[in-house]
Amino acid sequence: MTMINYIKYGFRWTIHSKTKDGIRKSKIEIAKNPKRFEIINFLLEQFKRETTYLEIGVRNPNHNFNKINADSKHSVDPGVEFKSNPVDFQLTSDAFFEALSTGKILTSDTRFDVIFIDGLHLAAQVDLDISNAFKFLKPDGFVVLHDCNPPTEWHAREDYYFNMTPAKGYWNGTTWKAFVKWRSNSEVQSCCIDTDWGIGILSKTAAIGGSIEGSNPFFEYDIFANDRKKYLNLIDFDQLKDKLLSS
Ligand SMILES: C[S@@+](CC[C@H](N)C(=O)[O-])C[C@H]1O[C@@H](n2cnc3c(N)ncnc32)[C@H](O)[C@@H]1O
């Protein structure tokens, strides 16, 4: 590429409406409150008993794990993004659940009150993580997912490492697809709190939101984005409190 093209295309990218839109939407999302640990702590407070918490995908524990208030906490991460990786189990989620189910770690009858899934953000992996999480969740427990509400298709790209998009380094991956898939399961109640890139919540007992009919069979981003209130049951934190405190 000649120098003139290099400058021309770089400049066009910088001033393109999609680039500006992506940058603007990242800023809006970052400014939202509450953050994920406040929602998780609220859910844990609902149990009037000793609580057990599991986090899948931790990175720097100061950002979330260390802010969680539970009587017993466990952390799982293979250490892809944070070299020191100070977690209980330096494993992928698949390896962790396999070892848990065979009693090689903890005990096979271990059950958690809240499991926070924030590991590999690709739909097939998140779907499997949700499935495994329900096997080790107490009957009235919550599965919580980060990054369910990507503000643009660039935030919802599959490749974490390619950041020359309007989302720059921000990445929600395709977690939204797994969450939307579980929202069509009639045995599961669900909602997504509109903050911190979308905090998805799944429960088998709490009345937080009924299932939806599948109407986006190919999980196309634009169809999802144009009706995200429906696909995610997108609500704010006060609405979640109303639902849980009134039930
Ligand atoms: C977005 S970060 C987690 C952020 C953290 N939960 C927080 O709230 O600040 C994603 C983490 O998932 C980890 N990860 C990647 N693949 C994984 C897998 N297969 N199983 C579990 N964790 C994985 C990465 O190493 C990374 O530390």
Image: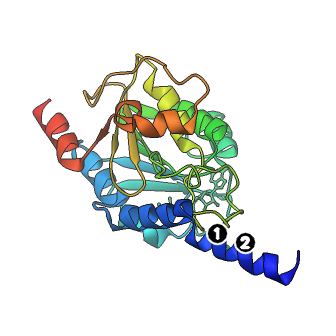
Is residue 141 depicted above or below 57 in this figure? above
State which quarter of the image contains the C terminus. Answer: top left
Above or below 183: residue 161: below
Q: Residue furthest left?
A: 246
- Identify the residue under disc 2: 9
Image vertical order of residue 131 relative to residue 61, above or below: above
Identify residue for label 1: 13
- The secondary element bearing badge 2 is classed as helix
User: Based on the displayed image, in which of its 4 quarters is residue 96 positioned?
Assistant: top right
Q: In which quarter of the image is ligand 1?
A: bottom right
**Neighbour class for label 2 at 10 Å: few (<14), some, many (≥20)?**
few
Give the residue type that dot 2 points to: Tyr
CB contact under 8 Å: marks 2 and 1: yes
Q: What residue is drawn where x is 58% and y is 22%?
A: 217
Lateral position of residue 133 relative to residue 10, left or right: left
Q: Position of residue 66 (x, y in %)?
A: 41, 67
Q: Residue at x 72, y 71 (%)?
A: 9
Q: Position of residue 221 (x, y in %)?
A: 55, 39
